[in-house]
Image: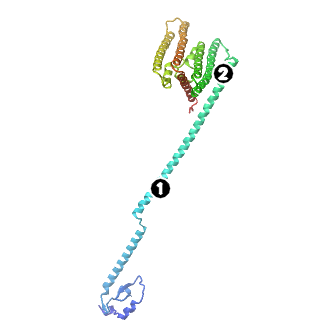
Amino acid sequence: MTQSNVSLVSPNTLHHFGEINTSIGSSETAVVAEGGRFPVQGGGAAVVDGGLGNVNNFENWGDSATAEHSHQTDTSTDVDTDEKVQSFCIPHGAAVMGLDSIEKSKGRLLGEQKSLRRQAQNREAARKSRLRKKAYVQELENGRLRLAKLEHELNQARQQGTLAPATGSVGDKSHSSVGNGALAFDMEYGTWLDEHQRLVADLRLAVNSFFGDNELRHVVDGVMSHYDKLFRIKRIGAKSDVFHVLSGMWKTPAERCFMWLGGFRSSEILRILGSHLEPLTEQQLVGLCKLQQSSQQAEEALSQGMEALQQLLVETLSSASLGDYMDQMAAAMGKLATVENFLYQADLLRQQTLHQLHRILTTRQAARALLAMSDYMARLRALSSLWLARPTN
């Protein structure tokens, strides 16, 4: 080293510089002495060892000081960056809880949306149901009004004693005569049905009010006599138009589905009444079994007879051996005369079954049987009304 490159600093001077606070600029490098620090311009510095003034090589010191300053600066920057990162990082547990909260919120929101949609769908379904019910009730009311109007017209015709006018050709008069017979029968049956409903209401009241056997027997006998009247009306109507009575056009559509030869099957009615007659004695059970067997045998015989008659009519009308059209019609008419007899036999079977059932049962059991039979027929009529009044769209 040369003298020009070395500066000697006394201890007093070091002490003087140690008391001075100097701001270190960007172009200054700090030189550390034993008691203080002082700036050295130009990147060089003098280092004093202790208080002896030994001078070290400041060239190497400048590099090391710069490196140390850089290291300190990097360290400081890393520490600051880590602190900033840590200050912005979210703990793992808090993040999981936050995700769970978000998921729960989404789940609640979806559940509320589904609930709202279901409520809206339920309200719409209820509204449509109310509209359908309103339309259905309106149809029933219209049907009732039409029936009431028809009944009023029939009552007026019966009171005046006039039916459809028989005008036109001979064929028209014949058709009108047959139609008048069917209409008269329908009016008679309508009157009978109204009276039957009143008698059944009286019978139900007598059963529920625990009338005595004598009083109850009087009501039961009245219902049985009313059924006898129905069979007389049918016999008269068959003489005017047997096909009208046989086909059951005077009945409701549901009743016609279960008709057999212009009325109910006796064996079927006995099966329906079975559960309404208990308890039964052994003698009553034997009597009912015999009655049902005999009814079934008679029904089978009449059904076979009707099938045979239909086959004969088919053969007669399709036969080519007969001379002309009039001969075929005369032969067919002769065979059709037996249809009225089949209808009479079927009604006779029904009438005898009712009377035999009445004899087998006690008065109170017979009353329950008549009520069950009437309720069954009334439900068939109600089913027809509901079916006809149903919304077609």
| Residue located 40% across and 73% down the image | 80
Give the labeled residue for mark 1.
Answer: 105
Which label number is shown at residue 153?
A: none
Q: Image check: 110 left or right of 33?
A: right
Nearer the N terminus, badge 1 or badge 2? 1
What x and y, as percent, mark residue 393?
56, 33
Residue 329, image x, y percentages: 55, 9
Residue type marked 1? Ser
From the image, tell me which residue sits under label 2: 154
Residue 215 can be seen, yes or no: yes
> Considering depth in this image, is 370 or 34 the residue closer to the camera?
370
Q: Residue at x 69, y 21 (%)?
A: 156
Residue 306: x and y, percent? Answer: 50, 13
The residue that appears at 56% across and 19% down in the rendered structure is 248
Quadrant of residue 50 within the rendered picture: bottom left
Q: Residue 354, how many percent across, how many down? A: 53, 18
Side of 199 relative to 276 (left or right): right
Mark 1 vs mark 2: give the one in front: 2
